[in-house]
Image (cartoon, helix red, strand yellow):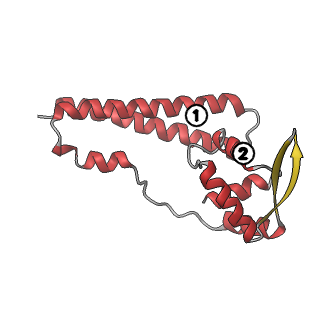
């Protein structure tokens, strides 16, 4: 999916790998994020497959490659956008661990769940900061992905709060 996200970004502007990472951090990180170690190899692959091209230039005394979407890349992006989405179950590490929490003493479980809640709360805070930063710049669909992330994370947080209460009542 990273390839199509990059194609989508490049459909709007010519960008450097660094700029792609920055945009991703402030827009799609609640559902897809990538390191420079993933972005640059993907840019090479997309270039090799002629879905993007680049121009090399010097900006501010620094050598930069600015990537652009090709006609073939736009066709591939549009084809992907028109492909119906298939729901796939989430593969969360915490669910795998929770499945086996019966192997731990109960006194250890609640602190683990509460620690997980803290990490989710931090993610919600990050999304609120992103929302504040880009609420006037995002289009309807881009903002919808942000709302989905916030609502999904809130659901996870609420579920775990109820879980803590249930664990406390468990005999």
Label 1 SS: helix
Q: In the depicted view, which residue is nearer to us: 90 or 54? A: 54
Q: In the depicted view, which residue is nearer to us: 95 or 155? A: 95
Where is residue 159 drawn, in percent x and y? 36, 37
- Left or right of residue 28: residue 149: left
- Left or right of residue 7: residue 85: left
* Label 2 or label 1, whichever comes before in sequence order: 2
Find residue 18 and name its label. 2
Task: Kindly identify the residue that appears in the image at 62 percent across and 28 percent down.
Answer: 129
Residue that mark 1 sits on: 127
Label 1 Cα crowd, 10 Å radius (few <14 / some 14-19 / many 20+): many
As drawn, 38 above or below 52: above
As drawn, 59 above or below 37: above
The image quarter in which residue 38 lies: bottom right
Distance between mark 2 and mark 1 Cα atoms? 21 Å
Marks 2/1 in contact by CB < 8 Å: the verdict is no
The image quarter in which residue 73 lies: bottom right
């Amino acid at each position: 999916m990273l390839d199509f996200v990059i194609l989508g970004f490049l459909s709007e502007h010519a960008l450097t790998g660094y700029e792609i990472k920055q945009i991703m951090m402030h827009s799609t990180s609640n559902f897809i994020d990538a390191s420079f170690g993933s972005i640059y190899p993907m840019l090479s692959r997309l270039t090799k497959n002629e879905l993007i091209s680049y121009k090399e230039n010097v900006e501010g005394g620094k050598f930069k490659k600015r990537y652009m979407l090709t006609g073939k890349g736009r066709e591939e992006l549009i084809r992907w956008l028109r492909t119906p989405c298939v729901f796939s179950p989430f593969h969360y590490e915490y669910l795998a661990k929770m499945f086996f929490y019966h192997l731990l003493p109960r006194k250890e479980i609640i602190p683990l769940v509460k620690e997980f809640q803290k990490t989710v709360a931090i993610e919600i805070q990050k999304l609120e900061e992103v929302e504040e930063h880009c609420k006037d710049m995002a289009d309807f669909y881009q903002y919808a992905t942000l709302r989905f992330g916030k609502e999904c994370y809130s659901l996870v947080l609420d579920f775990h709060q109820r879980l803590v209460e249930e664990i406390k009542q468990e005999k």
